[in-house]
């Protein structure tokens, strides 16, 4: 049912309409062009609408039409490999129709309405069904099977179910409910501001393996976890998100470019389709959905893009997949909230952001988690939310950063000074933290090694002591330090340069398995233990740095995964032999 009103006033993306028979969060079409908007405030007969397109040229008196439905996304086969804007308009299709610049009011179906999909039913006539049941499957891409699920608020007995080729709007199943028959199609529609239901959420006990040593070994994130990645311009946020998209063991990646610069988003849109999934050799886009909402696009659509992304992620989580959602960057989303709030003349909070900024951020991150979808099925899926934050000038006291840190449990602090020294990933090991370490420790003990937590603690302790000693060195000089403290500086340098530093563009070093990471740390631990023994026996650190085994350690990240076991056994033996010989040499003197 469509209800007509007319424009009363216009202020940027905020339009006030009168005589509109609509309710909160209904989608409306504004003006002669039918610009898409959403009702965000109602006072008496005045309806405040945030418009997701450029409002220049609109004038009072133009018609406003309510659709009577909330802002929603279409979910079904065809989402993967797609590139959307913030309100799920397919950018590649609109570009083919309108050219490089989107004409205002341009729309296109989010999913391909004419493509036929091979549907294979997994239930039979007469079966009882309800919300969340999988009624059949469609091979969406070579990598991902789309599991067609029963929609919310529908239950009953299957009256008929078909197999064969269908379009997404075709009926594949008819269900006899209590009061009427329901037609089930390949696609379903879900309002973006409403989280999809799950039966049970689990504690975060399984890590998301990324292949990045500084993340997996020092600051791991759980599947279903939340991460804040704040950092100034040029500190490597985008490269980290590239690496996570390519190498993490998530089944599906949703990348939301929210308010980023056009050239940065262009780089992602051109490089992602060329990347290959290392595990299957297929294009990475076969398990990726891109949502592009650049800084020159209408500001209100930024706010919607975050919700569009997380709703799509929930859809695949409900099928039992592990989904990683990259939001780059939530600062731009918060700026959109601030602009809309200012136009609504709301009372500003800290630095002009609306007073409800913290609530909106927490509502977004609360949609992460690892969950069992329905009680009748042991299907488990997860959404890991990784939010990049771009505070002005890298200021971590920014309200967006502080509110994000309050609700996320992992903090990867990107450091511009590390990036300028060409140390990548430029995650500062002193400022970063992971609150998942305790809950993940049993997984690491069972799947990597029972000593993993002890080795982790030793390495972090050495790096902490190094930072304290750096201040002393500046005061008294390196030569004045006792040999034990010189050893800490020596081992810390090896950890930084030979373990934490990782080359994303090197075929071998770009990914490091957990087994190799543990063995690399054990090599450094063995070196540290032997060096401490040598110092106790009277040797100086300067006499051990020239040992032949040291140059082999500096090249350990260049060794292939399949050759690393042999390399590990050989180098442990060499370390013990070389240090034993110099210790015996001292004792015999």
Image (spheres, helix red, strand yellow):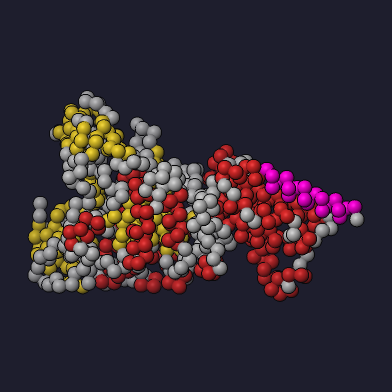
Answer yes or no: is residue 100 visible. Answer: yes
Q: Is residue 155 above or below residue 51?
A: above
| x and y, in percent, of residue 582 in the image | 82, 53
233 relative position to 92: left or right: right
Which residue is situated farthest in the top direction here?
126
| x and y, in percent, of residue 325 in the image | 38, 52
Q: Quadrant of residue 118?
A: top left
Q: Quadrant of residue 335?
A: bottom left
Observer-nearest of 341 and 424: 424
Observer-nearest of 174 and 1: 174
| x and y, in percent, of residue 55 in the image | 19, 69
* In magenta segment, residue 373: no
Q: Is residue 118 above or below residue 333?
A: above
Q: Which residues are magenta?
A: 569-588
Which residue is situated farthest in the bottom direction here?
475
Q: Residue at x 78, y 51 (%)?
A: 579
Q: Residue at x 66, y 63 (%)?
A: 466
Q: Residue at x 31, y 45 (%)?
A: 315
Observer-nearest of 327 and 242: 242
| x and y, in percent, of residue 109 in the image | 19, 51
Q: Quadrant of residue 296?
A: bottom left
486 relative position to 82: left or right: right
* In magenta segment, residue 575: yes
586 relative position to 309: left or right: right
290 relative position to 179: left or right: right
Answer yes or no: is residue 324 visible. Answer: no
The quarter of the image holding the C terminus is bottom right
Q: Residue at x 25, y 44 (%)?
A: 76
Magenta segment, prevailing SS (helix, strand or loop) = helix
């Amino acid at each position: 049912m469509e209800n007509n009103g007319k424009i009363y006033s216009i202020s940027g993306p905020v339009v006030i309409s009168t005589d509109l028979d609509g309710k909160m969060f209904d989608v409306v079409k504004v003006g002669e062009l039918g610009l898409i908007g959403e009702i965000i405030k109602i006072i008496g007969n005045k309806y405040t609408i945030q418009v997701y397109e450029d409002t220049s040229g609109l004038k009072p008196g133009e018609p406003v039409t309510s659709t009577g439905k909330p802002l929603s996304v279409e979910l079904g086969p065809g989402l993967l490999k797609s590139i959307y804007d913030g309100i799920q308009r397919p950018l590649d299709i609109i570009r083919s129709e309108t050219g490089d610049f989107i004409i205002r009011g341009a729309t296109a179906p989010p999913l391909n309405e004419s493509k036929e999909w091979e549907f294979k039913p997994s239930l039979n006539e007469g079966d009882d069904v309800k919300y969340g049941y999988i009624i059949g499957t469609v091979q969406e891409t070579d990598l991902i099977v789309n599991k067609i699920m029963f929609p919310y608020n529908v239950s009953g007995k299957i009256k008929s179910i078909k197999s064969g080729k269908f379009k997404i709007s075709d009926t594949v199943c008819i269900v006899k409910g209590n009061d009427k028959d329901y037609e089930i199609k390949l696609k379903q529609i879900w309002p973006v501001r409403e989280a999809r239901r799950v039966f049970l959420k689990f504690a975060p006990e399984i890590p998301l393996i990324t292949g990045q040593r500084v993340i997996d070994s020092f600051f791991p994130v759980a599947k279903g976890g939340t991460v804040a990645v704040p950092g100034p311009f040029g500190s490597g946020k985008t490269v980290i998100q590239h690496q996570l998209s390519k190498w993490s063991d998530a089944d599906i990646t949703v990348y939301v470019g929210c308010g980023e610069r056009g050239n940065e988003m262009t780089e992602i849109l051109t490089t992602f389709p060329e990347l290959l999934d290392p595990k299957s050799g297929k294009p990475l886009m076969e398990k990726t959905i891109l949502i592009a909402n650049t800084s020159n696009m209408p500001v209100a659509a930024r706010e919607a893009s975050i919700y569009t992304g997380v709703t799509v992620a929930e859809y695949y989580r409900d099928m039992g997949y592990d989904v990683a959602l990259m939001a780059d960057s939530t600062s731009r989303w918060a700026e959109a909230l601030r602009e809309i709030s200012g136009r609504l003349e709301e009372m500003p909070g800290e630095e002009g952001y609306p007073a409800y900024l913290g609530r909106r951020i927490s509502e977004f991150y609360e949609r992460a988690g690892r969950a069992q979808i329905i009680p009748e099925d042991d299907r488990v899926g997860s959404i890991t939310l990784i939010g990049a934050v771009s505070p002005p000038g890298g200021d971590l006291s920014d309200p967006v950063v502080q509110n994000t840190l309050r609700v996320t449990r992992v903090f990867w602090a990107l450091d511009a000074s590390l990036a300028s020294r060409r140390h990548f990933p430029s995650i500062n090991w002193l400022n970063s933290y992971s609150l998942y370490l305790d809950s993940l420790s049993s997984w690491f003990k069972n799947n990597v090694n029972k000593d993993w937590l002890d080795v982790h603690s030793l390495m972090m302790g050495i790096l902490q002591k190094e930072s304290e000693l750096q201040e002393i060195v500046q005061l008294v000089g390196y030569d004045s330090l006792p040999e034990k403290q010189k050893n800490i500086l020596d081992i810390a340098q090896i950890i930084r340069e030979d373990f934490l530093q990782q080359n994303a563009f090197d075929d071998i070093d770009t990914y490091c398995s957990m087994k190799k990471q543990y063995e690399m740390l054990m090599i450094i631990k063995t070196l540290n233990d032997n060096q401490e023994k040598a110092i106790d026996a009277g040797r100086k650190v300067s006499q051990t740095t020239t040992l032949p085994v040291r140059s082999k350690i500096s090249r350990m990240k260049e060794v292939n995964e399949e050759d690393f076991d042999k390399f590990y056994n050989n180098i442990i033996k060499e370390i013990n032999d070389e240090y034993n010989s110099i210790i015996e040499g001292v004792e015999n003197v």
